[in-house]
Image (cartoon, grey):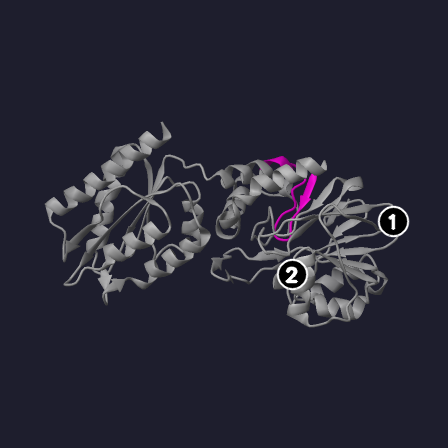
């Protein structure tokens, strides 16, 4: 088996993007991959394409196995442009007999590329096609994480091509989970889940149940980003089930921005109170921590404490950005509190508190606001807030 052979006569033919550092707000500090897969059979079939600009990589890898013009079918599991951006070029070169997609995928392809002349064929969940000695069974996975998303399952190979589920943004020369350090792999997988799939957590148990209902048995999961799971596919399934449950650990985050260090002093006092209760606590200054890395920490945190000074009758831009990003990800089961300093108007704590209420977080205590520089009594109140939060976490997890 070669470095890129997923199963016999099934090959990874995607592209590695070593340079990308931002994925619509997600920090891809180690790049990513755009995975595509070629099944060589009576009807050679390409599963997904790559981001526009990487079609040369895709064609190079395809040509090491087959003349692209001999490919009969293209399967579009997901229409997002990092997987379908090169589709027009591939259709022009391959001239496929059929392009398989979900019903929502059909609509998305037409609205993206405006090509009603393409040989699009809609497939439903549970439907199968034959590509020769292999069967491909489709499973719609709507809103994981787009309406068009679906899986392709090859039962003869016990292979699940899982679209954007179970992926990671990580550029490597290695292709498989057993070729990299597992702790780092799971860290990238957790970040991917937290920043992309968290809002759809309620759908994960339903998906697992559907897989069981259909009797899909697989020993390899091939996602559209990152490493392929061949050694421990059950590990990522189990992790998704855990992340979807959003069960908190004995952990708190203090997420803040500061102007002249008064809010920062308050943050450190709250930290001492939490740590004094035996809570694993992280101080996350948004000037030093990217929003997507903070969200990864949010995934299993029991309590979130937000701080900002008042700026122009509002909150600091970095915290405003973070709260907007967090709201869209819809985290659940969080205790919360707000704090901050001010010079003359003092709206920040109220603005943060309203944002937390909108996200349905459980406020543990009224927010604390301090004029100018905190006194010893102010810092004692902050320490008491941390202590109170710590005790509530202990009670909740008891």
- Discs 1, 2 touching: Cβ within 8 Å: no
Name the residue beneath numbered marker 2: 79
Q: Quadrant of the C terminus?
A: top left
Q: Position of residue 172 (x, y in %)?
A: 60, 52
Looking at the rendering, the stretch of residues picked out in magenta corresponds to: 216-235
Crowdedness of circle 2 by 10 Å Cα count: few (<14), some, many (20+)?
many
Q: Is residue 29 above or below residue 158?
A: below
Question: Which mark is first along the chain, 2 or 1?
Answer: 2
Horizontal side of residue 13 vs 271, given as left or right: right
Q: Residue 280 versus residue 394: which sits nearer the camera?
A: 394
Viewer can see residue 293: yes
Mark 2 residue element: loop
CA separation in Å, label 1 and label 2: 26 Å
Residue 229 placement: quadrant:
top right
Q: Quadrant of the N terminus?
A: top right
Give the residue at x 44% y 55%.
328
Residue 80 placement: quadrant:
bottom right
Mark 1 residue element: loop
Viewer can see residue 217: no
Q: Residue furthest toward the top?
A: 398
Horizontal side of residue 263 vs 239, given as left or right: left
Q: Position of residue 97 (x, y in %)?
A: 84, 63
Q: Residue 8 versus residue 141: which sits nearer the camera?
A: 141
Give the residue at x 72% y 56%.
13
Q: Residue 228 in magenta? A: yes
Crowdedness of circle 1 by 10 Å Cα count: few (<14), some, many (20+)?
few
Name the residue beneath numbered marker 1: 132
Q: Position of residue 372 (x, y in %)?
A: 14, 58
Q: Residue 110 versus residue 158: which sits nearer the camera?
A: 110
Q: Position of residue 255 (x, y in %)?
A: 32, 50
Give the tally of numbered discs. 2
Give the residue at x 40% y 50%.
294
């Amino acid at each position: 088996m070669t470095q890129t052979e997923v199963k016999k006569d099934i090959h990874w033919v995607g592209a590695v993007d070593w340079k990308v550092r931002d994925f619509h707000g997600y920090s891809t500090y180690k790049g990513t991959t755009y995975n595509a897969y070629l099944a060589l059979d009576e009807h050679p079939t390409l599963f997904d394409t790559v981001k526009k600009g990487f079609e040369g990589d895709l064609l190079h890898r395809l040509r090491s196995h087959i003349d692209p013009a001999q490919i009969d079918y293209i399967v579009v599991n997901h229409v997002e442009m990092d997987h379908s951006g090169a589709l027009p070029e591939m259709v022009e070169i391959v001239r496929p007999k059929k392009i398989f997609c979900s019903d929502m995928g059909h609509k998305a392809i037409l609205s993206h590329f405006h090509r009603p002349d393409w040989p699009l064929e809609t497939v439903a969940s549970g439907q199968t096609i034959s590509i020769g000695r292999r069967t491909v069974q489709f499973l719609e996975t709507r809103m994981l994480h787009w309406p068009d998303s679906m899986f392709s399952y090859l039962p003869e190979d016990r292979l699940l091509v899982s679209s954007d589920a179970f992926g990671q943004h990580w550029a490597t020369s290695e292709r498989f989970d057993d070729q990299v350090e597992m702790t780092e792999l799971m860290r990238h997988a957790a970040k991917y889940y937290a920043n992309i799939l968290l809002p759809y957590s309620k759908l994960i148990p339903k998906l697992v149940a559907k897989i069981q209902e259909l009797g899909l048995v697989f020993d390899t999961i091939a996602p559209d980003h990152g490493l392929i799971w061949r050694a421990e596919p059950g590990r990522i399934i189990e992790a998704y089930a855990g992340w979807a449950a959003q069960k908190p650990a004995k952990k708190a985050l203090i997420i803040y921005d500061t102007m002249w260090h008064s809010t920062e002093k308050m943050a450190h006092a709250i930290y001492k109170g939490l740590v004094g209760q035996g809570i694993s606590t992280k101080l996350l200054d948004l000037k030093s921590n990217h929003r997507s890395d903070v969200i990864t920490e949010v995934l299993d945190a029991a309590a979130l404490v937000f701080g900002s000074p008042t700026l122009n009758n509002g909150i600091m831009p970095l915290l405003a950005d973070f709260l907007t990003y967090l709201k869209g990800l819809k985290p659940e089961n969080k205790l919360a509190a707000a704090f901050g300093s001010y010079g003359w108007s003092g709206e920040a704590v109220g603005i943060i508190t309203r944002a937390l209420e909108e996200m349905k977080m459980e406020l543990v205590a009224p927010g604390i606001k301090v004029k100018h520089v905190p006194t010893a009594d102010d810092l004692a109140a902050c320490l008491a807030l941390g202590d109170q939060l710590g005790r509530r976490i202990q009670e909740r997890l008891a």
